Image (cartoon, grey):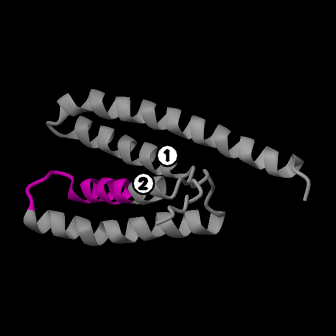
């Protein structure tokens, strides 16, 4: 059998409309998940925990699709969890999530630059 090489997925961006829709959908889904957390767990901040969980799932999907905005969702999710750590007895996780924020900022910087490079090359390339 001849193996067909699939083209590598390039870093790309969401449209503004898609970004807003995904973010608002995440908020709405977080209310449902937060309700379940409040009923079935003993966490102190179930809705923030739910929002964090939903944003992390969104992050994973966007990372798999190589969308630059995935890193923004990751930064937002980890900032929320830093707040949760400071408000609860999860202080030992604070540094871990601060590291995640730094790594997410780095990932955003790298992917954004890669996206801009791809865009500049496509503008220069003859059509």
Image location of residue 53, percent across then percent down: 29, 56
Location of mark 1 (residue): 71
The reply to whether dot 2 and dot 1 touch (C-beta < 8 Å) is: yes
What secondary structure do most residues of the magenta stretch adopt? helix
Instruction: Please report the residue visible at 17 percent of the width from the left and 69 percent of the height from the top.
Output: 36
Q: Is residue 75 left or right of residue 33?
A: right
Image location of residue 64, percent across then percent down: 45, 56
Q: Name the foreground residue: 98 vs 111.
A: 111
Give residue 80's quadrant in the image: top left
Q: Is residue 106 above or below residue 36?
A: above
Residue that sits furthest to the front in the current view: 1
Give residue 127's quadrant in the image: bottom right
Location of mark 2 (residue): 59
Image location of residue 58, percent across then percent down: 41, 60
Q: Name the foreground residue: 75 vs 103.
A: 103
Instruction: Please report the residue visible at 38 percent of the width from the left and 48 percent of the height from the top.
Output: 77
Badge 2 density bin: few <14, some 14–19, many ≥20, Cα 10 Å: many
Instruction: Please report the residue visible at 91 percent of the width from the left and 53 percent of the height from the top.
Output: 126
Q: CA distance from mark 2 to mark 1?
A: 7 Å
Which span is picked out in magenta? 41-57
Which SS class for mark 2? Answer: helix
> Which of marks 1 and 2 precedes in the sequence?
2
């Amino acid at each position: 059998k001849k193996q067909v090489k699939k083209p590598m997925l390039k870093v790309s961006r969401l449209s503004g409309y898609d970004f807003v829709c995904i973010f608002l959908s995440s908020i709405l889904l977080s209310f449902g998940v937060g309700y379940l957390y409040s009923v079935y767990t003993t966490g102190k901040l179930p809705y923030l925990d739910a929002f964090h969980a939903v944003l992390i799932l969104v992050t994973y999907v966007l990372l798999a699709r190589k969308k630059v905005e995935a890193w923004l969702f990751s930064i937002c999710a980890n900032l929320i969890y830093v707040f949760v750590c400071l408000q609860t007895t999860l202080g030992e996780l604070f540094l871990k999530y601060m590291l995640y924020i730094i790594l997410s900022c780095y990932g955003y910087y790298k992917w954004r630059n890669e996206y801009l490079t791809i865009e500049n090359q496509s503008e220069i390339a003859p059509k």
